Amino acid sequence: MKYRKFSDLGWNVSEVGLGCWQLGWGWGEVISNNNVKEILKKTLDKGINFFDTSDTYGDGRSEKFLSEMIKSTSEKLYVSTKLGRRVRGTNYPKGYKQEPMEEFVDRSLINLGVECIDLLQLHCPPSDVISKKETYEMMDKIVKKGKIMNYGVSVWKVSDALQAIKNPNVKSIQIVFNIFRQKPAETFFEEAKRKNIAVIARGPLASGLLTGKINKQTKFPENDHRNYNINGKAFDVGDTFSGVNFENGLKAVEELKKLLPDNFSLSTLALKWILSHDAVSVVIPGAANKSQVEINASTSDLGNISDIIPQINSIYDKLIKADVHNRW
């Protein structure tokens, strides 16, 4: 496993981390307790030390499993959680205030079993919250109380990322970035590097499209966001199949398969493409079993793909760009 620096924090994080949404729910059948423990054990075996979760993933289930893992090892692990999605509904957006947000922090501290959270990210807040100085003043107060060490913002749009990093205390941006969502590389990464902002690449496999295992006949359970959020009813559709037109995505996948180098699967090609961008600090694929952890982690040691990147990008330009590039 190779490691990368994370902002100016002195952290060396595994370039392949673990996204822990699947350890909660929202992906169909809930992963059993034993399987979650096997997944987390395998991450440690493979040198993964960065974990991204949220207080909403399984209503804290994901955080609680990470707590068990933290206690089980002497290795330094970096756990990032997110908050803010709980304020939606009748309390939204008034919930982005000191008292309710600090209550969410306290809940995550208990779930994670720690005294201070390494990195707390605002969980895809609306643009008007991102643009308010009061938002960051609130986060600074929570830092001063010793409850969080650092903070960042998880966003849907590049414009929100650029707005968030105007605040000097924002250390990271989490954003959808993959072969099907290339805009961040064009309009955000240089500014992130200039300001020493860590970039967490989420949705790297476009909700499984970029595994090559999904086809027109694939059916998703009712409790899988690839079913209930296909039209963006529950949250921004950009987090489901990266907002890509499903049929165009399948066509692009078939084109990408023709480019696979020796020893690569489509999943590892997709992850390696992301890691070819030096602005990326860590990519956070999820995993439904320990075999997927092994496959994802193996990407770090695979060879360079620079010779086929122009062809990969050409597939994006031809089949995907028109649908997504200017939306996020």
Image (spheres, rainbow, N blue to C red):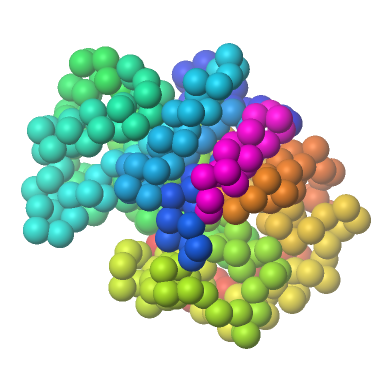
Quarter residue 137 falls in: top left
Q: Name the quarter where the C terminus is drawn.
A: bottom left
72, 163: nearer the viewer? 72
Which secondary structure class fits the magenta region best?
Answer: helix
Residue depicted at 74% across the width and 55% down the height:
269
- Is 267 left or right of 179, judged from the image as shown? right
Spot the residue most to the right.
262
Q: Is residue 184 above or below residue 102?
A: below
208, 309: nearer the viewer? 208
Quarter residue 132 falls in: top left
Q: Is residue 267 above or below residue 165?
A: below
Q: Is residue 231 above or below residue 92?
A: below
- Is 146 left or right of 172, judged from the image as shown? left
Residue depicted at 31% across the width and 22% down the height:
148
Residue 43 belongs to the span the image colors magenta: yes
Q: Position of residue 150 (x, y in %)?
A: 35, 24
Quarter residue 63 falls in: top left
Residue depicted at 49% across the width and 48% down the height:
23
Residue depicted at 82% across the width and 55% down the height:
264
Q: Position of residue 51 (x, y in %)?
A: 51, 35
Q: Does residue 307 show up?
A: yes
Q: Position of residue 285 (x, y in %)?
A: 58, 49
Q: Is residue 191 above or below residue 319?
A: above
Q: Position of residue 284 (x, y in %)?
A: 56, 44
Q: Name the quarter where the N terminus is drawn.
A: top right
Residue 122 belongs to the span the image colors magenta: no
Per the rendered image, the range of residues in magenta is 31-47
252, 76: nearer the viewer? 76
